Amino acid sequence: MELNILTLCYIIASVTFIIGLKMLSNPAKARTGNLVAAAGMTIAIIGTIFLYEEEGQKLGNYGWIFGGIAIGAIVGTLAAKKVKMTAMPEMVSMFNGMGGACAALISIVEFNHLAFPVIPGSTEIVYPGAAVGHVLIIVLGLIIGSVSFAGSMIAWGKLNGKVKDFSFKGQHLFNILLLLIILALSVYLVGWMPPQAKLIFFIILALALLYGVFFVMPIGGADMPVVISLLNSFTGVAAACGGFLYDNKVMLTGGILVGAAGTLLTILMCKAMNRSLTNVLIGSFGGGGTTAAAAGKKEQGNFKEISVSDSAVLLSYANRVYIVPGYGLAVAQAQHVCHDLEKMLESKGVEVKYAIHPVAGRMPGHMNVLLAEADVPYEKLLEMEQANEEFPSTDVVLVLGANDVVNPAAKTDPASPIYGMPILDVELAKHVIVNKRSMKPGYAGIENELFFQKKTSMLFGDAKKVLQDRVGEIKNL
């Protein structure tokens, strides 16, 4: 009966994962979807702890189990509550890396259990042929989990500025060679299980960690959202391997869902950038290459500035205003003031909407989460395709901290490293106001042609301070 109840727990948990993932596709239901999936995971964990049996024995060690759960829950809760919105991408990357590390640790533990039932007093390794498939899953979980962990840690360091882009001549060939060595050792280990199996296993672990580091090191900052999504899919696949090892249906389902969702998101983001995944991984876009530097030196002409008071007048007497949020808005923690501006303009009869680019910010959905924190209505957040249709009939577009995602060079300059990337066509509006701290290029390392167009006005300063001043000016109009 207990086994049946545990199976029921796993079925309920699997269903909640699917429902939760489906709800995450809708911003209005995303928070509820997250809670639904978390409830399912709680049911699966509690069911496993108290109902799982093997050879008539339950898990036991409840002190260690609940002690670990308590520590993890406290650390996770405090980290999530204290993290700034600008640091959300690196927190996601770090937590994803912890998932990869767990999968790798499972493989290490299970390899020792499975591969070394040694006869007392003998050094001979007993390796039943029936266990070949099991060892294959163990090694796959080790490699994928280790790459995900190491790569996510480098991504975390690059996002918070502690790790710089690094590459050397022939690095991609080095990475391919390293991967081939890992695969060759894995085939040798699984197929022949030599006496040095344990040594080879840990060599594979070390090389997989090294590969994870060199895999992410050369990738530029502008591509980090794609890399985070890809590493997330790796963690899901590694977790699914753990599900195979333990014949645990809910672990398998959860891993497959995460792996599939991460893969689909990676493909969609590459499509949004009009680039292949190979180009993202090899091209080092945003890494400060010579192409980007050359494009950044292109003579653009002069730009014009606008004062806070003049921008307030322009916004107040517009019929339709679009706000384009970018990473600069997150850095300034200005989402709440931005919402105040939206409400102030609407009180004057101005229609206000937000245009969200798929790769704005430092992770998928970064801008959506940022604005949701400020209680911006979900229906005001328009995706790129919808917004581009409305820009020609828009009076003013207010760009807050965005750069590369509004750069017309993506459409006009074949020499630009972002050429071909779909952008927000803000230049089609009647007026464009760009709020930036300076004229410093964005993550792609190139000048933005938009800043030098006749209909564009630059407003320099911290986004939060400028928005606060603008709200004050609009109140007095």
Image (cartoon, grey):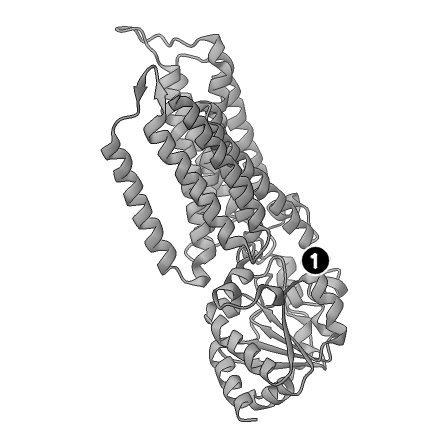
Foreground residue, 217 or 34?
34
Position of residue 15 in the picture relative to residue 117 (left or right) = right
Q: Hey, which quadrant is residue 122 in on the image? A: top left
Foreground residue, 406 or 10?
10
Total labels: the figure holds 1
Say above or below: 86 vs 268. below
Observer able to see residue 378 = yes
Q: Position of residue 138 (x, y in %)?
A: 46, 24
Q: Hey, which quadrant is residue 63 in on the image? A: top left
Task: Look at the numbered disc 1 and give the secondary structure of its residue.
Answer: loop
Q: Which residue sits at x=67%, y=67%?
A: 407
Quadrant of image for the C terminus? bottom right
Say above or below: 350 vs 138. below
Q: Position of residue 181 (x, y in %)?
A: 52, 27
Name of the residue lying farthest toward the bottom: 477
Foreground residue, 202 or 315?
315
Q: Which residue sits at x=32%, y=29%?
A: 50
Q: Amino acid at mark 1?
A: Met
Position of residue 462 in the picture relative to residue 324 (left or right) = left
Q: Position of residue 362 (x, y in %)?
A: 53, 58
Q: Residues within 10 Å of mark 1 (few under 14, many from 20)?
A: many
Observer able to see residue 143 = no
Name of the residue lying farthest toward the left: 63
Quadrant of image for the N terminus? top left
Q: Which residue sits at x=51%, y=14%?
A: 191
Residue matched to label 1: 421
